Amino acid sequence: MTGRADTEPVIVRVDRDRCIGSGMCALTAPDSLALGADGLAAPLAEYADGGAELTAELTEAVDYCPVEALTLHSARGGYRIDPAD
Ligand code: SF4
């Protein structure tokens, strides 16, 4: 992850067409992501406040997702942060 401040608010998005419900993201970032009743991941909030610890968890979750279903975006600019374009 590059080109951003650790305090920037971020949005995590789940591509539910890709998600296979492995649960890795819910284990890695339990304050931000959870499996829904349909067995697929969903964000717990519209955006994360940009705290460094939370952002680090989300970055790990993006990296660990086995099917690349997660992306992080700037809550201010909307651009994709991770994975980088
Ligand atoms: S890690 Fe990826 S595949 Fe697994 S539940 Fe989360 S978004 Fe879905």
Image (spheres, rainbow, N blue to C red):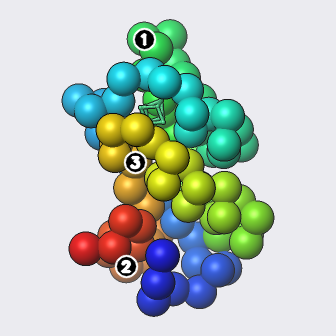
Considering only order in the chain, which callout, 1 or 3, is on the residue closer to the N terminus?
Answer: 1
In the drawing, does residue 68 fall left or right of residue 50? Answer: left
Tag 2, which secondary structure? Answer: loop
Q: Which mark is residue 59?
A: none
Q: Is residue 56 above or below residue 6?
A: above
The image shows residue 82 at horizontal and vertical percentages of: 41, 67
Q: Residue at x 58, y 71 (%)?
A: 9
Q: Secondary structure at mark 1?
A: loop
Q: Amino acid at mark 3?
A: Leu
Whether the residue under disc 1 has CB within 8 Å of ligand 1:
no
Residue 23 location, x and y as percent?
55, 26
Q: Is mark 3 within 8 Å of ligand 1?
A: yes
Spatial separation of the CA atoms under disc 3 and disc 2: 18 Å
Which residue is label 1 attached to? 38
Checking the image for residue 70, the label placed there is 3
Q: Earlier in the sequence, mark 1 or mark 2?
A: 1
39 vs 25, left or right, is: left
Q: Which residue is mark 2?
A: 77
Label 2 environment density (alpha carbons within 10 Å; few <14, some 14–19, many ≥20):
few
Nearest the viewer among 74 and 82 is 82
Question: Looking at the picture, how far across and down is residue 24, in whole percent?
Answer: 57, 33
Q: Quadrant of residue 27?
A: top right
| Amino acid type, residue under disc 2 in the picture | Gly
Which of marks 2 and 3 precedes in the sequence? 3
Give above or below for 10 relative to 5: above
Q: Nearer the viewer, residue 80 or 67?
A: 67
**Front tag of 3 and 2:** 3
